[in-house]
Image: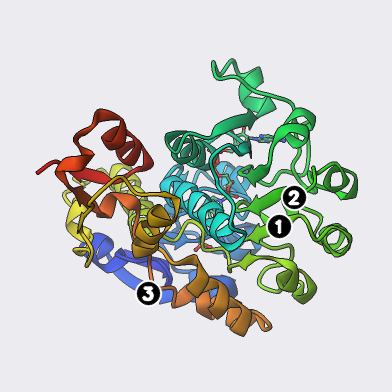
């Protein structure tokens, strides 16, 4: 069995090695010729899986994308061909949620502001939005959710309209899929008119898809409104972000909000489980055996961390400043953008750290750190 896999997918050898012969490819430039004799195709978000790519891949019996988003896959075409497809919903939700939370801690540090007391608006209350809300609520912030789709589906949480969210939120974090049609389409959800509604001093974070914000309108808006601060992980026209926009962002990264080691491993593992199911073979590997030990796996806390101490703790798993600096040095070419993604030093999730100290025994303290995602051990 021939398995074609994106070279940026970790643990493919460990998980799929026993199932067939693996060929690693550059997912962005994958050609139809390369997949013609494939039985299994494992991709990431940079590969357009459509008729043009797989029309002649007559042996293809499974396509998997180790991502949450599916906008790069023609799922209808796969269904017509009867080719089983899976993505990896939720695989990197914790990674994106923690990225957004850490970015807010970084902004608070940079502008010497307390995060406490701020109201955060989450647009899109699915896996990543909910993960971000979990951290923010654990930290004690008021969170407003806007998700008309979930509201219509009868989700029992409280939702507000986008207008209310924009009017009330000090920080807005975007977590929607990119959709071009329908009454809840998200393409340019934040257009010029919407951007002009932002309250003074709003922080706007985009960790979902670049085109959810009209990037040209954002440049013009930001040039007039320096009070608004931007954290941008995703860009219109990737892998070629608009240089003017990069310069206007406080933190800029190359679509790596979901790149925790745990998140990437979970993504590959979910594909492995589904493929085993499709092939009718036993999935005998475990996710936990894949992850290496973390160098800061145990941290002693003398007291409940302050906001800046929590940032220092968070920087043990992920220092956003490093990625921001690297990105500004390499984004100017498509190769630079992709190389940084390819060579990204995986960060860990909060759960990789076990916090130890008797003073954390107070249930509220333990609860807060636990709900943020850290492990805790009372000694
Ligand atoms: N930067 C990165 O590395 C990553 C980016 N993503 C992107 O983030 C997107 C969201 O991921 P998940 O939260 O896991 O997806 P999800 O499908 O679990 O949640 C998306 C939510 O957005 C809601 N939604 C749809 N249209 C909306 C609208 N007009 N207004 C408000 N809410 C709306 C949906 O009802 C759903 O609840 C993905 O589709 C993907 O494009 C996901 C993971 C990593
Ligand atoms: O899951 C998604 O959706 C994403 O956006 C991915 O985290 C992006 O990563 P790649 O698949 O492009 O490596």
Answer yes or no: do the residues labelled 3 and 2 have beta carbons within 8 Å? no
Residues packed near mark 1 inside 10 Å, few (<14), some (14 to 19) or many (20 plus): many
Q: Residue at x 28, y 47 (%)?
A: 276
Query: Which of label 3 and label 2 is nearer to you?
Result: 2
Scheme of image coloration: rainbow
Label 2 lies in ligand 1 vicinity (Cβ under 8 Å): no
Residue tagged by mark 1?
229
Q: Which residue is mark 2?
A: 201
Q: Earlier in the sequence, mark 1 or mark 3?
A: 3
What residue appears at the point 44 percent right and 50 percent down from the top-left corner?
307
The front one of 354 and 212 is 354
Quarter placement of the C terminus? top left
Circle 2 residues within 10 Å: few <14, some 14–19, many ≥20: few
* Above or below for 127 versus 298: above
Question: Is 128 left, or right, of 205 in this rendering?
Answer: left
Residue 87 is at least partly visible in this image: no
Q: Nearer the viewer, mark 2 or mark 1?
A: 2
Asked which secondary structure carries label 1, the reply is strand
Name above or below for residue 334 compared with residue 144.
below
Which quarter of the rendered picture does the N terminus lie within? bottom left
Decide: few, some or many residues near mark 3? Use Cα within 10 Å; few <14, some 14-19, many ≥20.
some
Looking at the image, is mark 1 or mark 3 nearer the viewer?
1
Cβ atoms at labels 2 and 1 below 8 Å apart? yes
Residue 96 place in picture, x, y as percent? 49, 51
Q: Using the rendered view, name the quadrant where residue 369 is placed.
A: top left
Q: Tell me how far mark 1 sits from mark 3, CA to CA.
A: 43 Å
Which residue is denoted by mark 3 in the rendering? Answer: 23
Residue at 44% x, 42% y is 90
- Mark positioned earlier in the residue sequence (3 or 2): 3
Q: Establish if 183 lies above or below 202.
A: above
Q: Nearer the viewer, residue 246 or 366?
A: 366
């Amino acid at each position: 069995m021939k398995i074609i896999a994106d070279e940026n997918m970790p643990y493919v050898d460990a998980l799929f090695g026993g199932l067939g012969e693996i060929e690693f490819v550059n997912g962005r430039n994958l050609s139809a010729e390369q997949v013609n004799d494939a039985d299994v195709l494992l991709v990431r978000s940079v590969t357009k899986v459509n008729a043009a790519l797989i029309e002649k891949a007559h042996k293809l019996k499974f396509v998997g994308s180790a991502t949450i988003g599916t906008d790069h896959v023609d799922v209808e075409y796969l269904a017509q061909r009867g080719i089983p497809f899976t993505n990896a919903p939720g695989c990197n939700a914790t990674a994106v949620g923690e990225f957004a939370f850490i970015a807010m801690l970084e902004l608070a540090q940079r502008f010497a502001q307390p995060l406490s007391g701020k109201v955060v608006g989450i647009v899109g209350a699915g896996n990543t939005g909910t993960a971000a809300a979990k951290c923010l609520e654990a930290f004690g912030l008021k969170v407003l959710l806007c998700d008309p789709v979930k509201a219509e589906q009868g989700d029992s949480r409280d939702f507000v309209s986008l207008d209310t969210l924009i009017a009330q939120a000090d920080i807005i974090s975007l977590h929607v899929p990119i959709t071009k049609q329908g009454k809840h389409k998200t393409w340019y959800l934040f257009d010029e008119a919407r951007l002009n509604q932002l309250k003074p001093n709003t922080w706007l974070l985009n960790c979902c898809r670049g085109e959810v914000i009209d990037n040209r309108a954002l440049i013009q808006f930001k040039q007039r409104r320096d009070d608004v601060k931007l954290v941008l992980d995703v860009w219109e026209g990737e892998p070629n972000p608009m240089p003017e926009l990069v310069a206007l962002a406080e933190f800029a990264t190359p679509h790596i909000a979901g790149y925790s080691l745990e998140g990437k491993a979970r993504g590959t593992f979910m594909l492995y489980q589904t493929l085993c199911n499709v092939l009718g073979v036993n999935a005998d590997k475990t996710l936990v055996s894949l992850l290496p030990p973390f160098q800061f796996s145990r941290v002693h806390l003398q007291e409940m961390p302050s906001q800046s101490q929590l940032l220092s703790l968070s920087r043990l798993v992920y220092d956003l400043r490093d990625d921001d600096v690297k990105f500004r040095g390499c984004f100017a070419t498509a190769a630079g953008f992709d190389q940084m993604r390819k060579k990204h030093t995986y960060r860990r999730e909060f759960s990789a750290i076990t916090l130890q100290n008797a003073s954390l025994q107070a249930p509220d303290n333990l609860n807060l750190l636990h709900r943020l995602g850290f492990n805790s051990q009372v000694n």
